[in-house]
Image (cartoon, grey):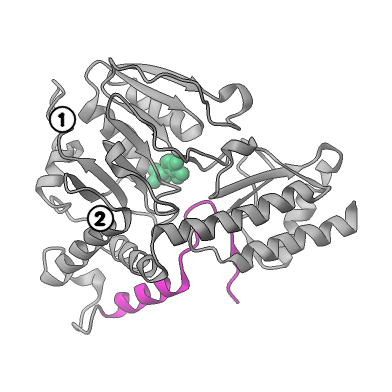
Amino acid sequence: MKKHNFSAGPSILAREVIENTAKAVLELNDIGLSVMEISHRSKDFQAVMDETVALFKELLDIPENYHVLFLGGGASLQFCMVPYNLLNKKAAYLETGTWAKKAIKEAKFFGEVDVVASSSDKNFNYIPKDFQIPADTDYFHITTNNTIFGTEIFEDYDSPVPMIADMSSDIFSRPVDVSKYGIIYGGAQKNLGPAGVTFVIIRDDLLGKVDRQIPTMLNYQTHIDGGSMFNTPPCLPIYTCLETLRWLKKLGGVKIMQKMNLEKAQLLYDEIERNKLFVGTAEKDSRSIMNICFVMKDEYKDLEADFLKFTAEKGMSGLKGHRSVGGFRASTYNALPKESVQALIDAMKEFEKLHA
Ligand SMILES: *Cc1c(COP(=O)(O)O)cnc(C)c1O
């Protein structure tokens, strides 16, 4: 039996996405060959790439003047590629968690970093509000969903400089006004596909403005010119992304997905608030709809391991919180069915009856 999969990443994919990928691994579109054993330059793989890009543009309503790239190296390589390609003197960063800190660390190799605001004072349990984005910076970088701490930025900020967003863990979870961003990037393995491919949505006027030389593979222009095929792209992960996008389109797109995600998150947050044993860690107005973090109230702390065991026995997986928050984290990505959230809520209620 398939488990309830709350893993933060790599994470749950829709059953039909996995099944269709399995079929293509055996044979792609009746061509007598696996998707893994054909040239990335063959017309069959080019069709996979073209449809993936087209669905990206359609489902996120990406304006004409943007490119969609599929690269290797994870979101972590983007922490380096963004400043390599864009940082001349100074860049602004919003520090909302571990991933933002890692992005800041890389940017410092290339220039000055202005951390416009940070929520480190409260272990990143909120999104800072009243901050100014300095107009004398080369760009402003944000992490829209903080996978580890369970906070999320739902607003597409107005920025006087190009806004760059790490959307690894909330891409396709809700509509985004792409026109407000210079670059949106992320690893696929949270809400889109398996590990191994990184998407980059990049506006076509951003490049060519830094003075330094950029190594070929780290230069976005290389990958724009090569249609993500300057070198061999991660063909199989891209294929799985395509299946996810087909599935998403069939369900009705990101607006419907947002509605479903809000519903799932609301159900679980309501139970966390109601239940005598648990307490949420993120501030209410910053709470993520993708990663729901909660702990046991102080008087019940010693029951945390028991609750993990209790849920594991009920077929739930991936609920242990990140070590920097502790407790529990239920990742409620697009592919997680409402039934899994309900199963967790039922377990919380049952555990409360046993212990409170
Ligand atoms: C997982 C994650 C990353 C790291 O992604 P890799 O592909 O492993 O480099 C970066 N940012 C966010 C927000 C993440 O959730």
Say left or right for 191 vs 269. left
C-alpha gap between disc 1 and disc 2: 28 Å
Q: Which residues are magenta?
A: 1-27
Q: What amino acid does circle 2 point to?
A: Lys
Of 304 and 144, nearer the camera is 144
Q: Which mark is residue 214?
A: 1
Is the residue 341 above or below the residue 276 in the image? Answer: below
Relative depth, front residue between 189 and 65: 65
Q: Secondary structure at mark 1?
A: loop
Report the disc number at residue 80.
none
Residue 181 x/y as whole percent: 30, 37
- Mark 1 packing: few (<14 Cα in 10 Å), some, or many (20+)? some
Contact between marks 1 and 2 (CB within 8 A): the answer is no
Q: How would you rate the neighbour count of disc 2 (Cα within 10 Å): few for under 14, some for 14-19, many for 20 or more? A: some
Give percent across and percent down for residue 149. 58, 38
- Amino acid found under the numbered disc labelled 1: Ile
Q: At 12% from the left edge and 42% from the top edge, which residue is drawn?
A: 222
162 left or right, relative to 50: right
The reply, left or right, for residue 292 in relation to residue 347 is left
Q: In percent of the image, x 31 and y 31: which residue is there?
A: 163
Which quadrant of the render holds ligand 1? top left
Q: Which residue is mark 2?
A: 57
Instruction: Name the spot of residue 167 as percent of width and height, x first.
Output: 40, 43
Q: Position of residue 330 (x, y in %)?
A: 61, 52
Magenta stretch holds residue 63: no
| Quadrant occupied by the N terminus | bottom right
Q: Residue at x 15, y 30 (%)?
A: 214
- Give the number of the mark in front: 1 or 2: 2
Residue under the point 22% across and 50% down: 68
Q: Earlier in the sequence, mark 1 or mark 2?
A: 2
Element carrying mark 2: helix
Give the answer, above or below, for where 182 lies relative to 236. above
